[in-house]
Structures are given as structure tokens and as C-alpha cells.
């Protein structure tokens, strides 16, 4: 498969010990932004509806519907876990629950009915553009391959002698650690000297992988929009997303037979990756209201240009039983090889294009007389256009060129769909929503997608509004514990993540 071949190729050139891989495109871009409780209750389909501070991050033209200023606060709580299916074994991860803040900010409206620009509005808002809080766990018995083969293959093809491995720039840090702990070693098979991993001598091995992620992307934005004769609404916003991502990985292979004479009991690789940085983007939008009941929206999101920094620390432990007298366990940390690897790079996210429509029931000018609405967004995202680049002129661009070429092969443009509705009962409103985010993989061995189902209630009276929403997110994806070069097939776990979000928005009109 193209996916397998491309990633395997990157594994081989991983001798440069760089940290950026095509999977980072998904981590940084295949996300479901949050919003106010109202916008999330209707599936996030706010593109043509307007009148919500979330418009700053979706279609800024929606700010043009404001004629009164308001203050908004949206705390939230996330409940997350995942289910993994690996080599015929199903497991469930532990819960990863966290408090967080969603769309919060201030909208200042200037109402000028005597002017052709009926009103103008300015917003300053903060939103959760991505939520990384999750936990993944899977395990199974593998009679086909071992993660140690990755290190053995890299060392074998590097041409580096074992005496020069410590300081070699042509070996990745995990491979150096595998050499140090004797997880891999040379052996003569059929008269040919080879590099093999100790688990390869076993008929099968037990494998398990535990991944815990934390953090998110918090975006601060300034938006501005104008209302032209209550027919055309034009707006734009500038966003500054701030990234904080933490991933802890603990991967283990062990001997299921407990045979103490085969020179292998287990090995464990632990890694801590922290990504921090910030970026800048722009969003432009327009809404046309041909009749009072109908609204049509168009929005364009430029790529976010990020400056990012990865910090990696790791540890490897290998138990080789009676291979060396009185020393059954070898371990080494990344500190042994000097300061923790620090990678600085730039990343450009995909373009987004959005078409939206909304129909307001009893769509009169007086919002207190409106009885609800139906709204929908269609979004087109160009994942294959994502790009990595060197952060400094002294860095070698050739690695990033290879990564970008693989990104173009692996990922495709895809459509996202959002739909929502609201029914208004005087001061009380009921809401339902659904959203689906399409598969970004060009040629992936598994199906991937994200779906949100949401419901909420709202209250509005005398300049005060309170909204409560629950969103259930279901994500299907694949997780590869390691990558092997062709012609071997890569093993992977089917992962289904279930993330629940409770959002409460409290707002005040400022007259």
C-alpha cells in the first residue's frame, strides 16, 4: 500500500533522528473546533446563521448580525476514553477527563440605522481549536513482526559500526538505545552476518501500547464585520493559535512463554513528546440574506502558519535474562546521549472553504418572534496541501522536502458536513445537531472519520442567556505501534475514541 511504503521510507531516512512525520498533519489539522454551547448544540453549523461569538472562528461575517454588545463565558468538561482492537484482542483505555475553557470573549456592536451600514461589530474571543485530551491502550499477541526489527533494519542499512553508534548522526536515538541495551545485536544466519532483534528469535510475542495525550490548541482572535442594509454581511478575523501538546508513550514487548533460557523476557520503550508553539491565520466571510427567512454564507480560512518546537525525552529497558551473568536488565535514557533532542520547524496547515445555509422559521426582524431555524455547513479541507519547512536557514531542507512529498501522497482533500436545528418556546430553546468530518487519508488500510452528535437547551430573557450542551464525539482511526519497510506489512490497531463534552455558556447583553 502507498501508505505503508511511504511511511517505511520515512522510517529509513529517520536516521537523521528528526521528529516530524506526516502523522503530525493529522495531529495539528484533523480536529473539531469547539464553540459556545449554542453553536455546539447545533453541530457547529454556524456559518450562515451568525449572531454568535463563535462566528469569529467560523464565518466572521456572522458578527454583522450583532446590534447589541455582549459578554460570553463558556467553561467545559471533557470525558474521554478509547477502545482498541489489535491482533484480535479488544481493550479499553482508562478515562482521560479534564476541565477546559471553550469560546469566551466580548462583542462590541455599533448600531447606526441611519447609515447604509446598519451596524458594525468588533469581537475579541478565545476558543479551543483542538482538544488533545485522550487515552489509547491496546495489546495483543503477534507472530508476525516485532518493533525491534525497525531498529535492527536501520542499524543494518546505516553502515555505521557498533563502536561509532554512540555519536553517529546517521542513527536515530531509539536505535542507539536498542544497541546499548542489546535489544538488537549481530548474528550469523546461513553464513551471512545480520542484525536481529532478540524478540525475533521467539515464535510470537505479547505487545502492548499505552498512549496518553494532553493539551490543545487555544486560539485568540480579533474579528470585525459590517451589516449592509440588512442584506449583505461582510467580515474578517485574525487568529493566533497557541499550541501545547503532550504525549506519553509506553510500548512493551514480552515473552509469553516465560522461558528463562531464550535470552529475552521483555523490552519497554518510553517516550515523552512535548510540542509548543504559536501561529497566525486569517478568516474571511460573507453572508447574503435575499429574504428575511433565508441566509447563505461563504467563508475561506487561510492556512495557519505555525512556528513549533518539539522536545523529546525517552528511555529503553531490555531484560535479556541469562545472556550476561548477573546483569539481566539493561536500561538507558536519552540523557545519556546529551541534552534532550529539540526540534524547531514551521508548519502550514490546510486551506478551508465553506458554504453554508440557514432557514429561519417565522424569520421576522424581531428575534423574539422567531420560532427556530435549520442550518447546515459544507466544508472542504485540503489536507494534502499541508507543508513542513525548516525554522532556520542553517537547517537542511531536504528532509522536509521528503516529508512534504509523502504528505501529498498520503492525504487528500475531503468534505466535512455539519447540520443543526433549534426550536424556540418563548424564552426556552431546544437544539439538536450532527457533524461528520471525512477521512483525510488517500490510501489508508482502515476507514477513518469523526462524527459528533449533540443536544442542548437554551434560555434567553432580559439580556441574560444560559446554554447547556452535551456533545458525543466518536472517532475511528488506526494506530501503528511501529513501521516496517517493505515488503513486510505493517500491523496496526483499530482505535475508536469516545469523547464526551459538557459545555455551559453564560452571557450578558450590554445595552
Image (cartoon, rainbow, N blue to C red):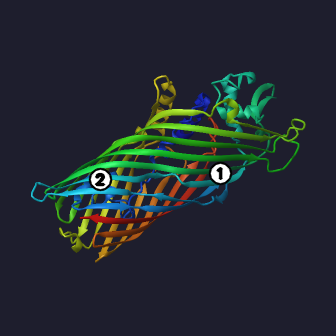
Q: In the visual, does 475 lie left or right of 180?
A: left
- Rendered location of residue 74, percent (x, y): 41, 61
Residue lying farthest front? 511
- Rendered location of residue 319, percent (x, y): 80, 42
- Closer to us: 52 or 59: 52
261 in relation to 393, above or below: below
Distance in Å between CA atoms under marks 1 and 2? 41 Å
Can residue 304 be seen by looking at this rendering?
no
Q: Residue at x 21, y 72 (%)?
A: 362
Q: Residue at x 77, y 40 (%)?
A: 318
Q: Which mark is residue 210?
A: 1
- Rendered location of residue 235, percent (x, y): 24, 49
Residue lying farthest right? 325
Q: Residue at x 67, y 26 (%)?
A: 157
Q: Secondary structure at mark 1?
A: strand
Q: In the visual, does 463 lie left or right of 231?
A: right
Mark before the other along the chain sequence, 1 or 2? 2
Can residue 91 be seen by looking at this rendering?
yes
**Dividing the image into 4 quarters, which one contains the N terminus?**
top right
Q: Secondary structure at mark 2?
A: strand
- Closer to us: 422 or 256: 422
Query: Which one is closest to the eye, mark 1 or mark 2?
Result: 2
Q: In the visual, does 352 lie left or right of 491?
A: left
Residue that mark 2 sits on: 123
Amino acid at each position: 500500500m502507498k501508505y505503508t511504503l511511504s511511511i517505511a521510507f520515512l522510517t529509513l531516512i529517520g536516521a537523521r533522528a528528526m521528529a516530524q512525520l506526516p502523522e503530525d498533519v493529522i495531529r495539528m489539522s484533523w480536529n473539531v473546533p469547539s464553540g459556545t454551547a449554542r453553536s455546539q448544540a447545533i453541530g457547529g453549523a454556524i456559518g450562515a446563521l451568525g449572531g454568535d461569538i463563535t462566528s469569529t472562528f467560523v464565518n466572521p461575517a456572522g458578527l454583522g448580525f450583532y446590534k447589541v454588545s455582549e459578554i460570553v463565558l463558556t467553561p467545559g468538561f471533557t470525558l474521554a476514553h478509547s477502545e482498541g482492537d489489535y491482533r484480535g484482542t479488544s481493550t479499553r483505555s482508562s478515562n482521560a477527563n479534564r476541565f477546559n475553557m471553550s469560546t469566551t470573549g466580548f462583542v462590541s456592536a455599533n448600531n447606526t440605522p441611519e447609515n447604509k451600514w446598519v451596524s458594525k461589530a468588533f469581537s475579541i474571543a478565545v476558543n479551543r481549536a483542538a482538544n488533545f485530551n485522550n487515552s489509547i491502550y491496546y495489546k495483543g499477541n503477534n507472530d508476525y513482526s516485532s518493533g525491534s526489527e525497525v531498529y535492527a533494519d536501520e542499524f543494518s542499512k546505516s553502515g555505521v559500526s557498533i563502536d561509532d553508534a554512540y555519536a553517529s548522526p546517521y542513527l536515530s536515538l531509539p536505535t542507539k538505545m536498542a544497541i546499548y541495551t542489546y535489544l538488537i545485536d549481530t548474528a550469523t544466519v546461513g553464513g551471512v552476518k545480520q542484525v536481529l532483534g532478540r524478540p525475533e528469535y521467539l515464535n510470537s510475542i505479547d505487545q502492548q501500547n499505552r498512549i496518553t495525550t494532553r493539551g490543545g490548541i487555544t486560539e485568540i482572535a480579533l474579528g470585525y464585520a459590517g451589516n449592509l442594509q440588512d442584506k449583505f454581511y461582510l467580515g474578517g478575523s485574525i487568529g493566533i493559535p497557541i499550541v501545547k501538546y503532550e504525549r506519553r508513550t509506553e510500548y512493551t514487548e514480552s515473552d509469553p512463554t516465560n522461558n528463562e533460557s531464550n535470552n529475552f523476557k521483555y523490552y519497554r520503550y518510553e517516550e515523552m513528546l512535548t510540542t509548543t508553539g504559536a501561529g497566525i491565520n486569517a478568516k474571511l466571510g460573507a453572508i447574503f440574506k435575499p429574504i428575511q427567512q433565508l441566509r447563505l454564507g461563504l467563508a475561506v480560512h487561510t492556512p495557519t502558519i505555525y512556528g513549533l518546537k518539539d522536545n523529546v525525552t525517552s528511555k529503553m529497558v531490555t531484560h535479556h535474562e541469562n545472556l550476561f551473568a548477573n546483569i539481566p536488565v539493561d536500561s538507558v535514557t536519552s540523557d545519556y546521549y546529551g541534552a534532550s533532542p529539540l526540534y524547531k520547524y514551521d508548519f502550514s496547515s490546510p486551506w478551508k472553504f465553506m458554504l453554508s445555509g440557514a432557514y429561519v422559521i417565522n424569520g421576522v426582524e424581531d428575534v423574539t418572534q422567531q420560532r427556530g431555524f435549520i442550518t447546515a455547513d459544507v466544508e472542504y479541507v485540503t489536507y494534502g496541501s499541508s507543508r513542513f519547512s525548516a525554522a532556520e536557514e542553517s537547517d537542511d531542507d531536504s528532509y522536509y522536502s521528503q516529508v512534504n512529498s509523502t504528505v501529498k501522497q498520503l492525504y487528500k482533500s475531503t468534505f466535512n458536513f455539519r447540520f443543526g436545528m433549534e426550536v424556540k418556546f418563548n424564552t426556552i430553546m431546544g437544539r439538536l445537531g450532527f457533524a461528520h468530518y471525512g477521512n483525510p487519508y488517500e490510501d489508508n488500510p482502515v476507514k477513518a472519520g469523526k462524527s459528533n452528535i449533540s443536544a442542548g437547551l437554551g434560555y434567553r430573557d432580559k439580556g441574560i442567556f444560559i446554554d447547556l450542551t452535551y456533545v458525543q464525539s466518536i472517532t475511528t482511526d488506526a494506530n501503528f505501534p511501529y513501521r516496517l519497510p517493505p515488503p513486510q506489512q505493517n500491523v496496526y490497531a483499530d482505535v475508536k475514541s469516545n469523547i464526551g463534552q459538557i459545555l455551559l455558556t453564560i452571557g450578558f447583553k450590554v445595552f
